[in-house]
Amino acid sequence: MYAVVGCGECSALWIVEGRPETSQCPRCGTTRAYEKRRQFVTTDDEDHAREVRSSMLATRQDLGEEFAELDSFAEMADYVDDAGMDEEAYLREAGVDTAAVAAAGKRSERGAGASGGSRKDIIEEALRTLDAPDEEAVVSYAGERGVPAEYARKALRKLERSGAVTRRDGGYRLV
């Protein structure tokens, strides 16, 4: 349920969704009980409420006839989706190699490791494959696979806090 309501203090118009106990004017900040606000239209369609509010604002500015010539909000939303260029075209026009950007994004998500897994996967792989996986050994293993040392240390702390690994005498073990 949507209602176009008005402020008795400053004559602002806005749309209220649902039936709140109170509503506050976005312009002057006056708070009143919802029932005491003047409701110009109540509808189940948000676009209809937008149309009514816009029409009222246009009429206030003596632009009612011009507003009547415009398409509906739903039709204009379709135009917006078709207008302009998409992100990839924009970047391409700006001289950015979008294929290189996409490849770099994939590398950053999974690390540069040969295992092809994510950074977290590389940390877990280190814990499984190393004989005595202490912090420095795991950091070194991960570093060889493109995972930054700071990330490896944080990941170990998070895995320990979550209970996925235990630490004893400086060494780690997967649970």
Image (cartoon, helix red, strand yellow):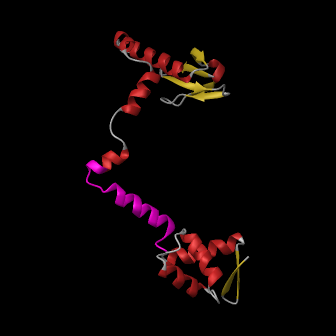
The percent coordinates of residue 58 (x first, y second) are: 39, 16
Q: Can residue 151 be seen in this view?
A: yes
Give the position of the N terminus as an image quadrant: top right
How many circles with numbers are drawn on the protein? 0
The percent coordinates of residue 153 (x first, y second) are: 56, 78
Residue 2 magenta: no
Prevailing secondary structure class for the magenta stretch in the rendered image: helix
Kindly identify the residue that appears in the image at 54 percent across and 68 percent down: 118
Q: Give the range drawn in magenta.
A: 92-113
The quadrant where residue 76 appears:
top left
Kindly identify the residue that appears in the image at 56 percent across and 74 percent down: 122
Kindly identify the residue that appears in the image at 66 percent across and 19 percent down: 35
The percent coordinates of residue 93 (x first, y second) are: 26, 48
As drawn, is 15 to the left or to the right of 77?
A: right
The percent coordinates of residue 165 (x first, y second) are: 70, 76
Is 130 drawn above or below residue 39 in the view shown? below
Give the position of the C terminus as an image quadrant: bottom right
**The one of 145 and 69 positioned closer to us in this rendering:** 145
Q: Can residue 6 be seen in this view?
A: no
**The one of 2 and 106 positioned closer to us in this rendering:** 106
**The one of 99 and 63 positioned closer to us in this rendering:** 99
Is 134 drawn above or below residue 35 in the view shown? below
The quadrant where residue 96 appears:
bottom left
Residue 105 magenta: yes
